[in-house]
Amino acid sequence: MVRKRIAFVWFGISGRYGVWRDGLWRAMKHIEEIHDVGYFEPSGNIELFNPDIILFWEAPYTSQGKDKDMWNRIINIPYRKALLFAGGPVKKEWVDKFDHVFVESKINKEEFDSLGIPNSTAFGINEEIMKPVDLPKKYIGIHHGTCASWKRQWLVGESLGKDGLVVGRYQESDRFPFDECKRLGTVVMDEQSPEKIAELLNESRICLQTSRADGGGQRCTLEAMACNIPVICMSDSPKNREYVEDSGFGVVTAPDAPHIKIEIESVLKREWGTKGREYILSKWTSRHYADNLLIWINKQ
């Protein structure tokens, strides 16, 4: 196999070293075993690295916002390029200069298929950090993710009150989800290290995945499953329903507190065993992530 030079590009990556240890990070460490990888901000000296391939992690709507110039810089660099799709809306003209798109969810694969854009699935979590640990339970339910209206964390507060925990980066521009949880007595924590998230998951009995259709949350769902914590997700969140329904490790409910409370009681009465982690190990580890990226990388 020919050893390739791969430029991995991500807005804000320089600030993530030391805290970036999710499934994608670990997948890239696997790839480093057989290829040379450089990590860059979009404004970095990518050309001096002389890559064979650029992997760019981002949401396509960035191309229409404040980062438009940097987005255009990346897609116009004359190397083979793949987009690691980070969610959000998409138009064909936003991504048609990429040679390939990697998606996380079935619904996005169907979307890119319909647009005629070459794509494949590549996703996974850091299974070495996210794993079951026998810890006393402090919380009925947890949700970890950035404070954002599309994640609807206030449903955790409405459904669990003081027995709930939300963890994530606070956003002054979108304060209501965490502020409402605090008002309702829910424990609110700032963004934590991956190791601390794993600990908090293992101190919880369920993962309450409240994100709506455009709210993502897939990593939160899979990390909970990796710790054998069952997931309650919302009926209008196809990305999370995919994993819950495929694994059978959790339930789907309507996105309102009365329905969520009913399902919480139901989930707490059941024995869930270890099939959550077994499901992760079967298809959603960092090694699966790396191998699916490598299928395209090694063909180039």
Image: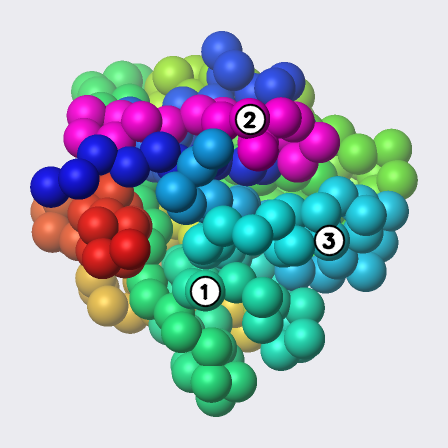
Q: Residues within 10 Å of mark 2 (few under 14, many from 20)?
A: few
Q: Position of residue 123 (x, y in %)?
A: 34, 51
Looking at the rendering, the stretch of residues picked out in magenta corresponds to 30-49
Circle 1 sits in a helix, a strand or a loop, which is it? loop
The residue under the point 65% across, 54% down is 76
Q: Mark yes or no: residue 152 visible.
A: no
Of pointers 2 and 1, the one earlier in the residue sequence: 2
In the image, 19 versus 225, the foreground residue is 19
- Residue type marked 2: Leu
Left or right: residue 67 compared with residue 74: right
Query: Label 2 to label 1, Cα distance in Å?
Result: 21 Å
Q: Residues within 10 Å of mark 3 (few under 14, many from 20)?
A: some
Badge 1: few (under 14), some or many (20 or more) residues near its Cα, within 10 Å?
some
Give residue 99's mark.
Answer: 1
- What residue is drawn where x is 45% and y is 54%? 80
Q: Which residue is mark 2?
A: 48
Q: Which numbered disc flags the more N-terminal residue, 2 or 3?
A: 2
Residue drawn 87% across the image and 33% down it = 172
Horizontal side of residue 284 vs 10, given as left or right:
left
The spot of residue 275 in percent (x, y) is 12, 50
Q: Which mark is residue 72?
A: 3
